[in-house]
Image (cartoon, rainbow, N blue to C red):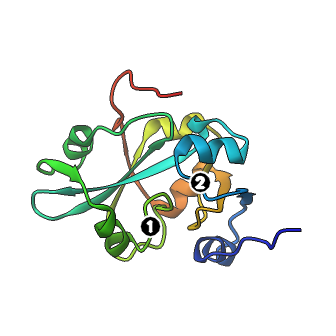
Amino acid sequence: MTEPISTHVTQYLESLSVQFRVLPHSRPATTIEDAAEQRGIRTAQMVKSIVLRDMSNRFAIACAPGNMSIDPKKVRNLLGWRRMTCVSPQEVISITGYEIGTVVPLMLNESIAVVFDNQIFDEKEVTISSGSKMAGLALRSEALAELCKPIMGDICRDNTETE
C-alpha cells in the first residue's frame, strides 16, 4: 500500500475544509498528457498554470484547461500590461515556490496576478498539482476560483485545442 500524499497544498486545502481528492501517480508526471493518463482523466479537466512577466517586471499566473494554449497577448490585454513572456524554470521556483510541472495558483511566494480562462468552468471538477509530481488533486472548479480570486477572461489561443 502506498503512503498517503501530504503536501503543503493538501494541508492548505484541509485547513480551509475544502473538499478534494488525491489522484496519485505511479511515476513522476513529465507532461500534461502523462499526468492526465495517470490520473485517469482528460487533459481538458486539468488546470495548467503558466508564469508570465511583463516589461515592467510584474508577474501573472495564467491558468487554462490542460488541452489549450495560453496566449500571452490576451493575458497582457486583459491586465492592461505591456508585452509578456514566460519566465525561466529557475525563476518559476523563486517567484512561485513551485517547480515546473507543480505550479498551482495557491500559496504563492509573491503577490502575483492570477488569471483564469473562462473555459476552466466548462468542467465542474478540475485537477491541479498537489505540489508534487507524484499526485494531482481533484476539486470543484468553483472552489478553486473561490480560493484564487482570479481575473477572468478569454486568454487561450484560438483553435489550439491539443486533445
Secondary element at tag 1: loop
Secondary element at tag 2: loop
Residue 156 showing in the rendered view: yes
Badge 1: residue crowd in 10 Å (few <14, some 14–19, many ≥20): some
Residue drawn at the location 67% of the way across and 41% of the way down: 37
Q: Position of residue 19 (x, y in %)?
A: 72, 62
Q: Which residue is mark 2?
A: 29
Q: Which residue is mark 1?
A: 99
Badge 2: residue crowd in 10 Å (few <14, some 14–19, many ≥20): many
Is residue 96 positioned above or below 61 on the image?
Answer: below
Q: Position of residue 137 (x, y in %)?
A: 66, 58
Q: Quadrant of the N terminus?
A: bottom right
39 and 10: which is toward the camera: 39
Quadrant in the rendering for residue 136 = bottom right
- The residue under label 1 is which amino acid type? Glu
Is residue 163 positioned above or below 13 on the image?
Answer: above
